[in-house]
Image (spheres, rainbow, N blue to C red):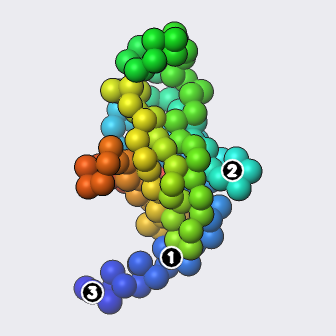
């Protein structure tokens, strides 16, 4: 069993930085996030979710900045500011429209079809989700 885990970890570590590019389904609310390259970094845009399917003009009502509450969630950039460092994208941030907060984030590829996204208020107050590639 441990040999299989070591092999999976080695395979993930050898994945190129651009493996993260594509559409990903989040763990919550059936969100779809499209990750693209933004210069030397990556960005992630919210494409869809349960809320957006129910109301395509869904607004960012919980944003902590009142002047941003009227913007639409569909098409909103929620991932930004990452740096590639040998096996993960780190130093970036994720915006959570569910609570209007922005959190420090790291994106690590598990394999070609799964990534781990860790968002932290401050270390060790973090939450990790596994996102699945949408084909």
In terms of depth relative to the viewer, which is nearer, 40 or 45? Answer: 40
The residue where tag 3 is placed is 2
Q: Is residue 56 above or below residue 49?
A: above
The residue where tag 1 is placed is 13
> In this rendering, does residue 36 appear at all?
yes
In terms of depth relative to the viewer, which is nearer, 48 or 71? Answer: 71
In what quadrant of the picture does the N terminus appear?
A: bottom left
The image shows residue 10 at horizontal and vertical percentages of 46, 82
In terms of depth relative to the viewer, which is nearer, 79 or 64? Answer: 64
- Sequence-wise first label, 1 or 2: 1
- Seen at 39% across and 25% down, the residue is 100
- Sequence-wise first label, 3 or 2: 3
Mark carried by residue 37: 2
- Seen at 57% across and 33% down, the residue is 77
Alpha-carbon span between mark 3 and mark 1:
16 Å
SS label for mark 1: helix
In terms of depth relative to the viewer, which is nearer, 99 or 111? Answer: 99
Observer-side mark, 3 or 2, equals: 2
SS label for mark 3: helix
The image shows residue 89 at horizontal and vertical percentages of 54, 59
């Amino acid at each position: 069993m441990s040999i299989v885990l070591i092999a999976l970890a080695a395979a993930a570590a050898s994945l190129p930085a651009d493996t993260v590019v594509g559409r990903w389904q989040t763990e919550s609310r059936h969100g779809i996030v499209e990750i693209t390259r933004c210069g030397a970094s990556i960005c992630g845009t919210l494409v869809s979710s349960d809320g957006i399917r129910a109301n395509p003009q869904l607004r960012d009502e919980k944003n902590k900045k009142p002047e941003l509450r009227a913007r639409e969630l569909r098409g909103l950039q929620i991932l930004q500011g990452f740096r590639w460092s040998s096996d993960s994208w780190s130093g970036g941030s994720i915006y959570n429209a569910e609570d209007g907060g922005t959190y420090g984030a790291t994106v690590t590829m598990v394999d070609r079809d799964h990534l781990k996204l860790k968002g932290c208020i401050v270390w060790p107050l973090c939450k990790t989700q596994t996102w699945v590639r949408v084909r």
